[in-house]
Image (cartoon, rainbow, N blue to C red):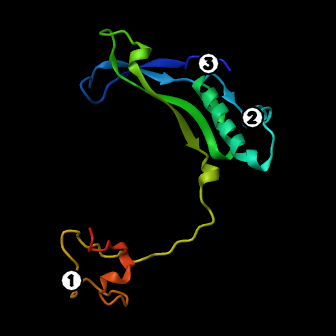
Amino acid sequence: MANRPLAYVLVERKASFGKMAGKTVLQARPTGRKRIDHRNFCEEVARATTFTGAEVEAVLRLAAEIAKQHVENGDIVDFGDIGTLSPSFQSKLVEKGKEKFNANVHITKPVVRLSASRKYFALSNVSYEQTLVKARKSIDTPPSDTDSGGSNSGSGGDSSSGSGGKLPEAGL
């Protein structure tokens, strides 16, 4: 697959903060050319794979690599129940009329952005349990045997019981 440049549009807006606050600036915003639907994406991955038990991980890695190639070309990939993968980047602000926008200088940090599927990642079969907040002890002050901060739930104030996530004091 040949690499195509990422498409972007220049958006004119007023800067609201920083050294260019209040000035009219240009900012690059990525645009997608086309959307690769999940079925076509899966067929593309399947053309290059076989499905043995040992190759499941390889298939998943291949799927991620092919998706990355599409995103590098500016496309948005529908990754099924997981969500969509799309290109994103940061754009430096350029004051309109003062400096010409240069994509190689002013566009930085290109990344793959995952927009997780709300349907897939919304948890529905969960339950809740309220717990009491454990009193935190300062690292600077050693624990005392006469702690008046509430009940110890049968620990007897023994710091060697291992409860509460305390670090052993000796040997540190």
- Out of 41 and 54, give the one closest to the viewer: 54
Q: Residue at x 49, y 18 (%)?
A: 9
Residue kind at label 3, given as amino acid type: Asn
**What kind of residue is marked 2?**
Val
Tag 2: Cα neighbours inside 10 Å, few (<14), some, or many (≥20)?
some
Residue drawn 75% across the image and 37% down it: 42
Q: In the picture, which quadrant includes the C terminus?
A: bottom left
- Determine the image quadrant of residue 69: top right
Few, some or many residues within 10 Å of mark 1 (<14, 14–19, 20+): few
Q: Is residue 104 above or below residue 67?
A: above
Q: Is residue 46 left or right of residue 160?
A: right
> Dot 2: what SS?
helix
Which is more N-terminal, label 3 or label 2? 3
Quadrant where the image shows the N terminus? top right
Residue named by callout 3: 3
- In whole angstroms, how far apart are the C-alphas of marks 1 and 3? 66 Å
Distance of mark 1 from mark 2, alpha carbons? 62 Å
Residue farthest toward the front in the current orientation of the protein: 171
Secondary-structure class at tag 3: loop
User: Could you tell me which residue is drawn at 72 percent across and 41 percent down?
Assistant: 59
Q: State the image coordinates of residue 73 (x, y, percent, origin top left).
A: 60, 22
Crowding at dot 3, Cα within 10 Å, few <14 / some 14-19 / many 20+, comes out as few
The residue at 36%/23% (across/down) is: 92
Return the mark for residue 45. Answer: 2
Q: Which mark is residue 144?
A: 1
